[in-house]
Image: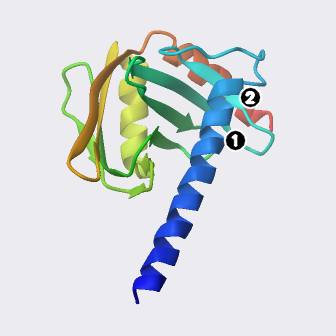
Amino acid sequence: MANDERVTLSMNRMLSVALGLSLFAQCAAAQGLGGQNQGPNQWVANCNMGRDCTVSATIDGNSLLGTFVILSYSVASATLTVLVDGVGQRASVRVDQWPFISTSICNGGTCSWEPLRSAELLDEFLRGRLMTIQVSLQGDNMIGPLDMPLAGFAQQYEQARRAQQGR
C-alpha cells in the first residue's frame, strides 16, 4: 500500500512539474503576439504552438528569497491558473477591495479556478486596478499576499482573445 501511495505521489509530482514547466516556458519565452519578453510584474499575451492563447504574469514577491507565482488566464478554456513552487492547497485572489475568491482545486504546484469563478475574476481583472494573490502550501506555509497592478491586463487580454478567435 505504501508503494502505491509513493508511485501516485511521484506521478502527481511529475505531472505538476511538467505542467509547471510548460506554463513557465510560456511565460519566460512569451513567443507569438509580437515575441514579447516577459519581465516580472507585467502582463503578457502569449499563444503557444497548440490551440491556446493566454494572458500571464510572473508576480515577483521577493526576488531575494525566490518567492514568485505565475498567474495565467487561458482564453481557450476560460480558466485562471496559478503556479507556485511548492504543493498548493488553496489559492485566493482579490481585486481591489472586493472579497477574495478562493479555490482548492490544486494538483501539486498548480491551482485552478472553475470556469464560473474564472469568469468572475476575469470581469474583475478587466475593471479593477490591483490584484492580490495568496497561496496556502502544504506544511502550513504561505506565499503572499502578493500585489500585482492590473494596468495592461485588459489590452493583453484583448490581444489574446483576438488571436484565439483567429485559430
Pinpoint residue 146: horizontal percent, then vertical percent: 31, 23
At 18% from the left and 32% from the top, the residue drawn is: 99
The quadrant in which the N terminus is found is bottom left
Residue 100, given in percent of the width and then of the height, sits at: 22, 35
Which residue reaches farthest top?
Answer: 151
Badge 2 crowding class, 10 Å Cα cut-off, few under 14, some 14 to 19, many 20 or more, is some
Identify the residue position indicated by label 2 in the image.
Answer: 163
Image point (44%, 22%), residue name: 59
- Residue 130 vs 20, above or below: the answer is above
Relative to 116, is 139 on the left or the right? left
Q: Is residue 33 left or right of residue 158?
A: right
Tag 1 residue: 52
The kind of secondary structure element at disc 1 is: loop
Foreground residue, 64 or 16? 64
Can residue 101 be seen here?
yes
Q: Position of residue 62 (x, y in %)?
A: 36, 19
Residue 159 image offset from top left, x and y in percent: 66, 21
- Side (left or right) of 51 relative to 97: right
Q: Which of the 4 image quarters holds residue 67? A: top left
